[in-house]
Image (spheres, grey):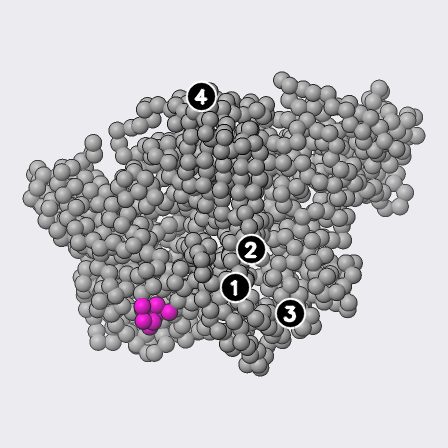
Amino acid sequence: MSRRVTVNLGIPQAPREVTVVIPDDEPTPWQLGDRFTIVGVETPRVDGPAKATGTAHYTYDIALPGMLYGAIVRSPYPRAHVNSVDLSAAKRLAGVRAALQITDGEIRFAGQEVAAVAATSSDIAVDAIRLIKVDYQPMPFVVDMDSAAAAGAPSVFSGSNVGGAKTLSEGDVERGLSQAANRIEATYTTPVQTHVSLETHGAVAQFDGGALTVWCSTQGVFSVRDDLAVLFNLPPDKVRVISEYLGGGFGSKFGATPDIVIAARLAKESGAPVKLMLPRGDEHLATGNRPSSEQKVRMGADANGKLVAIDLAQRGSGGIGGGSGSSGPFKLVYPCPNVRTSETNVFMNTGPASPMRAPGWPQGTFALEMAMDEMARKAGMDRLEFRRANNTNPIRAIELELGARAFGWTQDSASKKSAGPVRRGTGVACAAWHALGASGPEALAIAHRDGRVEIRCGTQDIGTGTRTALAVVAAEELGLPIAQIATEIGDTRYPFSLPSGGSMSSPSNTPAIRQAAAHLKDKLFKIAAPMLGAEPADLEARDGVIRVRFDPSRKVAFIDLCRRIPGDSISAGGDRIPNYASYRPDQAGCQFAEVEVDTETGVVRVKRVVAVHDAGTIIDPLTSRSQINGGVLMGIGFALFEDRRMDPNLGLMMNPTMDDYKMVGSLDVPQIDVMFLDVMNGGTNTGVLGIGEVAHVASAAAVACAVSDAVGAPVRELPLTPDKILAALGHG
Amino acid sequence: MNKFTIVTPADLAHASAMLAAPNHGAIAGGVDVVDLMKQDIASPATLVNLKGLPELQGIKLQPDGALRLGALVKLHEVATDPEIQKRFTAISDAAGEAATPQIRNLGTVGGNLLQRPRCWYFRNPLSVCLKKGGDKCYSIGGLNRYHAILGGGPSYIVHPSNLALALIAFGASARIVGPAGERVVALEKFFTLPSVDPKRENDLRAGEIITEVIVPAPAPGTRSIYLEVREKQSFDWPLVSVAVVIVPGGKSVRDARIVMGAVAPIPWRAPAAEKAIIGAPLDAAHARAAADAALATAQPMSDNAYKVTIAKVIVRRAILAAGGVAEV
């Protein structure tokens, strides 16, 4: 049975009543005016002490009796034919228990898996892979996009390396451009970025009877389970995947990645558990990356500064992978009557792309926002004013105002220019995302006789604080202190959940948790009601006490109530039902950056970032802020430092190390001021939106706009290293 | 990494004798040698642990004002010693700018001078470059944004030690003990160009150990500075670095030494730049002239002309800062 509920959503200055039809057992969505006890309160991570003291178990920490250690032979050639693989010498080495050929046929990038071994120690495994003789027939290759797209280039697969253009068009761009009062045209490029998760990919795999158990560093225990079930021809219930803790994924750890599959194959072959954790260099070569982009943008605005045409002709390369498009922001951030986007993927002999934090968006936003700046200057408008003039999202309008005030945005003027060589610059960029989550997750809430509450959900914590967010929601619903809630996640034995990606975890999981907690509460109220001489519907749970709503003197402590539980525990499940009507279907956000550029050396330092975001209900401001901080820092790395550098002659990545692949370090961290605009969004019973990706969308763009402002000329190619800054200044 | 054993020598002579044998390598802080072994660039069967040798220990300020730095002194100690900071500012600053606090707490003076280059062709186990017995320097026609603009050929590495610049600027020497006895070599002469032998960066011979670095007493009134420009502020190698030691004399410069880093396969002294300021007033015009002179013979590669620009800027800035002249 379902019921019709009208909830008050949005922001206090612009509330809106939204009527939704929801199942009877779905809790009433949180709405404006609800008073929370724990939601929205700064709650330190529930697993912080375990992580800080080293008792949190990552895949790296798993050690099983009789466990072997795996190692992988990777191709030293960017393209080659594998004529033969001779495993015999490796197999004869004492301590080697399994050796497998992984690839026969064509190698398409340097770092591709060719063979693997398992041995009684990791030293022996490394010795053994040196004994594997691979007869490679090297072949012509391409590792840069221009060469790959050129006529007559070696084919990465077959035929042309250039895919068909994916074009979307609204209105008439050429007409829009021809009627524009001001036009700009420029090409922006971004490099390949690698994920560099702190914990490398890897797994421990064990076959026991007909069952496979895998501990792995994954963003999706269930997707790994399903992949392995197919690959090893096992029913899903015979595959168990565990990821209690993982050290980041950023999109590179969905499904059964080669490291996991190889660990399982070695375990099957050897009949013993096998641990296979990738060395750092392999992460750069073979576990995914953000594709490059070359974005030719044409833009036109009318005499009032309204955009009348946006044209994007883009190509990008994800190596042997696809998905290099970056048109999202061009279509979704600034409304414009005439928009055309064209995306073309180019294959080349480098490691495959994989999703990476807001796929396509940091690249696209960089190009779009740089173009917006160039357009504003051409039109003689302040850059913030130009964005406001072209923004129709009411949430973003408020955010731009909040951010401008906090940042101290002033009209562009010469006052920024100092006499010395160091010049200050400012930039602003807008973000957008659509992190409403999806149905699918389930949860179980269990109250034990001793008053402990356990919630179980087969999600995993990619590092964002999932355990904490889920515990806060359960604690809020049950009126308990968070210390009384234990959150069990990261195991396919728990109720189903989705992969942690696309900013989906909190919006998808928290409603299932809340429903499970509400159902558990209903069961407990049924026990409490006769004790308190009331109907279950008259009870409320708050501060660890169940009370009669209209007579608070009639009460029972939660812990005392739990002693009445027949048996040892009582449990209730919860579902994540499909999204229903919400306040807005999307989220906004904007970031302001201030930089200093030494105009003589070309060195850029980011001094300050003001990030203003909305993410529906903010469950925990601490973990939410951490996500924004992380997104900003990753964006600074993308803007200033990171670049996968391929040698065109050798076809090798020359910087697959933490030394040469430059990432933001502690001294490169600016002051980051994070502001949240609380939007009660509805759509689910918690109204939570994800924040991991929107946090990162605008960061590099804001920094690049600020650098161009300081330099006094657009710098259109990331990363903004000193050579490019000096060239833009004319002292190259 | 190959299998290896670590042995602890009884004394310096024993250590030297062991290091003279084939397949032996030295370990002190272990920062670079372990990396080299992991990258299969060095594969010693035996590592000789120098850490306990008394001759290699300690910071000693001599009564005459000279400084003796034991080869085992940690970079962190050099960076934070108040006397070094006061009298040999460029030396403490160069040590303090290196790497990260963790590495400065492990890395030694001797190891810093003897570390191998960071060139990505040299470090990548898959590229058998000239320095590793191959037939070409891949930076030519390859990715050379961080490579040499001076003194290159046939290899175009840049020397990774920045401490060396400051030590050379102060006229320091290394005391070296080996099977043939002891020698004291000016650090300026110790480092060798690839045109001499592309496989090495210095004149340390089989079985030799740097025991200490001797920095002579600076002339009264000596001022020094070390500056570097790097892309990242945390844990990054300089694009260009410079150490300047100046002895003022009245209104002009009485003596000066200028040594640039990350520009050449060895720490690169710039005599023409020194000449441009010695005997001249310390002002912006002379500093600029010195900077131009320092880079006059620069031959940038395809991707690193920007390093010439940066080098000129920091040479000029360092001269002016060492002279206490504020830039307009």
For residue B199, what is the image quadrant?
Answer: bottom left
Nearer the observer: mark 4 or 2; the answer is 4
Q: Amino acid at mark 4?
A: Ala
Q: Residues within 10 Å of mark 1 (few under 14, many from 20)?
A: many
Point 47% across, 30% down: residue:
A177
Marks 4 and 2 belong to one chain = yes
Label 4 to label 1, Cα distance in Å?
51 Å
Label 2 to label 1, Cα distance in Å?
11 Å
Magenta segment, principal secondary structure?
loop
Q: What chain does mark 3 sit on?
A: A
Point 31% across, 28% down: residue:
A417
Q: Quadrant of the N terminus of chain A?
A: top right
Marks 2 and 1 belong to one chain = yes
Q: Which residues are magenta?
A: B128-136
> In the rendered image, which residue does mark 2 sit on?
A321
Point 72% across, 56% down: residue:
A226
Marks 4 and 1 belong to one chain = yes
Label at residue A108: 1
Q: Amino acid at mark 3?
A: Leu
Of residues B232 and A82, which is closer to you in this image? Answer: A82
User: x, y percentage for residue B74?
Assistant: 34, 56
Kindly check if marks 4 and 1 are in contact, taking CB atoms under 8 A apart as contact. no
Q: Amino acid at mark 1?
A: Arg
Dot 4 or dot 2, earlier in sequence: 4
> In the rendered image, which residue does mark 3 sit on?
A266
User: x, y percentage for residue A96?
Assistant: 59, 76
Q: What chain does mark 2 sit on?
A: A
Query: Regarding mark 4 in the picture, which secondary structure is present there?
Result: loop
> In the rendered image, which residue does mark 4 sit on?
A303
Against B249, is A98 above or below? below
Marks 4 and 3 belong to one chain = yes
Query: Regarding mark 3 in the picture, which secondary structure is present there?
Result: helix
